[in-house]
Amino acid sequence: MDRISWDEYFMAQSYLLSLRSTCTRLCVGATIVREKRIIAGGYNGSIKGDEHCIEKGCKVVDGHCIRTIHAEINAVLQCAKFGASTEGAVIYVTHFPCLNCTKAIIQSGIKEICYANDYRNNEYAIQLIKKSNIKLRKIFYDNNLVIKRMQKQC
């Protein structure tokens, strides 16, 4: 049997979450895992009760959409809302976290960041990750390969 790895499993969850994104510029998903158990997930989109970019367009200031909360922040906030500790957890993200998300990840106690795609990788974010002794891994992930393996098994 050709089982998918834990990394593929959790990254697949992040890609699934990204399909809920309401951002028209980039769909991002994030999954927080502790002891091989998913404790939270998030995708990028508008705050609760606000208009969505897919409905009203992006609200861009200085090259950034200010209407959107990033997937990583949504996942961390979900943990805060429901009382799940992020201390020592791993976050799987479809794209490299921005500087502000990196800061939130560090402050939350997450100890490993796994991402699939480079996206505007911020040099200062990389420095902060190294200073904080957080493990950073770029994961090769191919949806098509995972789907083929699923079809073979099921």
Image: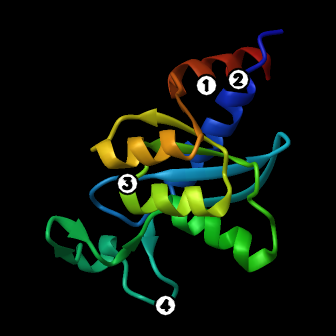
Instruction: State the quadrant of the N terminus.
Output: top right
Dot 4 surroundings within 10 Å: few (below 14), some, or many (20 or more)? Answer: few
Q: Which residue is mark 3?
A: 98
For marks 2 and 3, give the CA distance: 32 Å
For marks 2 and 4, give the CA distance: 37 Å
The answer to whether 124 is drawn above or below residue 45 in the figure is above
Front: mark 2 or 3: 3
The secondary structure type at the circle numbered 2 is helix
Dot 2 amino acid type? Met
For marks 2 and 1, give the CA distance: 5 Å
Q: Position of residue 69 (x, y in %)?
A: 43, 71
The disc, 1 or 3, on the residue closer to the chain's N-terminal end is: 3
The secondary structure type at the circle numbered 1 is helix
Residue at the (78%, 17%) spot, across then down:
3
Image mark for residue 49: 4
Q: Position of residue 34 (x, y in %)?
A: 80, 48
Asked if residue 122 shows in the view, the reply is no
Q: Which residue is mark 2?
A: 150
Dot 1 amino acid type? Ile
Question: Closer to the camera, 130 or 110?
Answer: 130
Question: Closer to the camera, 20 or 65?
Answer: 65
Question: Closer to the camera, 106 or 144?
Answer: 106
The disc, 2 or 3, on the residue closer to the chain's N-terminal end is: 3
Give the residue at the far top of this rendering: 1
The disc, 3 or 4, on the residue closer to the chain's N-terminal end is: 4
